[in-house]
């Protein structure tokens, strides 16, 4: 069964600290993995997209890693800011475009001063 | 600000009402999507339009009726909804090719009374 599991479910960190969010998936075959940030009451915004041949990709303070062999990905946030408070969703796509995406249930990150 | 615009931002309707949600994008994307998102859950795919034709209907009840008047516009017509249909309705668009990210709007928060 194609599944995407994220951990932790929620996380609270102090401003300025680093954190790492995890994503494990069983989707096969696999085309790409995306991390999205979703602020409360708003639509998700793409942070990174990685194909099976990529093992790391950065977007500012966000760095995503991918191990296609173990089917694991992580999202590392450096020097967290209050504006990083949001849900982070891991989305895995089999071949065929964006019509058949598997969404994780997300990690709710809260950054406190 | 998102490049996908959704109106209205909030909608409250009774179970006998007829209303429509609207979505617009001017990025030249040929694929457009409707998603439904309940609180603390990932988005669930409802409909996909590719080149203005309905290509995927994820067994959505007929009280939801999508329409794609042209390549930039996507509507969702609502009739005889139930209270459990209350959710955030997200529109998204993409280039439709492999690996292309979804661009989400900020959604319409729908409450059915």
Image (cartoon, helix red, strand yellow):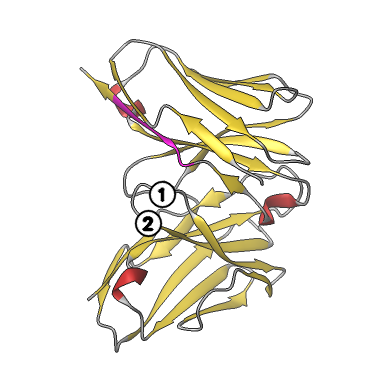
Q: Which residue is found at the position 51% from the left and 83% from the top?
A: B62
The tag on residue B41 is 1
Both labels 1 and 2 in a single chain: yes
> Disc 1 is attached to a residue of which chain?
B
Left-right relation of A103 to B19: right
> Who is closer to the viewer here, B15 or A28?
A28
Which residue in the structure is indicated by mark 2? B38
The answer to whether residue A37 is magenta is no
Q: Which residue is found at the position 69% from the left and 41% from the top?
A: A27
- Report whether residue A60 is seen: no
> Disc 2 is attached to a residue of which chain?
B
The percent coordinates of residue B69 (x first, y second) are 59, 79
The percent coordinates of residue B2 (x first, y second) are 45, 49
Determine the main secondary structure of the stretch shown in magenta: strand
- Residue numbers of the magenta segment: A105-110
Residue B62, compared with residue B30, is above or below; it is below
Left-right relation of A39 to A54: left
Q: Residues within 10 Å of mark 1 (few under 14, many from 20)?
A: few
Confirm or deny contact between disc 1 and disc 2 (CB under 8 A).
Answer: yes
């Amino acid at each position: 069964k194609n599944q995407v599991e994220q951990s932790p479910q929620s996380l609270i960190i102090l401003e300025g600290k680093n954190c790492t969010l995890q994503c494990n998936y069983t989707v096969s075959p696999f085309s790409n993995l995306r991390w999205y940030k979703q602020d409360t009451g708003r639509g998700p915004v793409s942070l990174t997209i990685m194909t099976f041949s990529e093992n790391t990709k950065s977007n500012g303070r966000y760095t995503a890693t991918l191990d296609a062999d173990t089917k694991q990905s992580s999202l590392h946030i450096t020097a967290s800011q209050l504006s990083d408070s949001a849900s982070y969703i891991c989305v895995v796509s089999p071949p065929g475009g964006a019509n058949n995406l598997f969404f994780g249930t997300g990690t709710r990150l809260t950054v406190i001063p | 600000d998102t490049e996908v615009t959704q109106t209205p931002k909030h909608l409250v309707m009774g179970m006998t009402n007829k209303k429509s949600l609207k979505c617009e994008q001017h990025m030249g994307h040929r694929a457009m999507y409707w998603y439904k998102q309940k609180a603390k859950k990932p988005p669930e795919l409802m409909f996909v339009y590719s080149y203005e034709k309905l290509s995927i209907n994820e067994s959505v009840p007929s009280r939801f009726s999508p329409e794609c008047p042209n390549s930039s516009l996507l509507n969702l017509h609502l009739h005889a909804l139930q209270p459990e249909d209350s959710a955030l309705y997200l529109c998204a668009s993409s280039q439709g090719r492999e690996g292309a990210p979804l661009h989400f709007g900020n959604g319409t928060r729908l409450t059915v009374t």
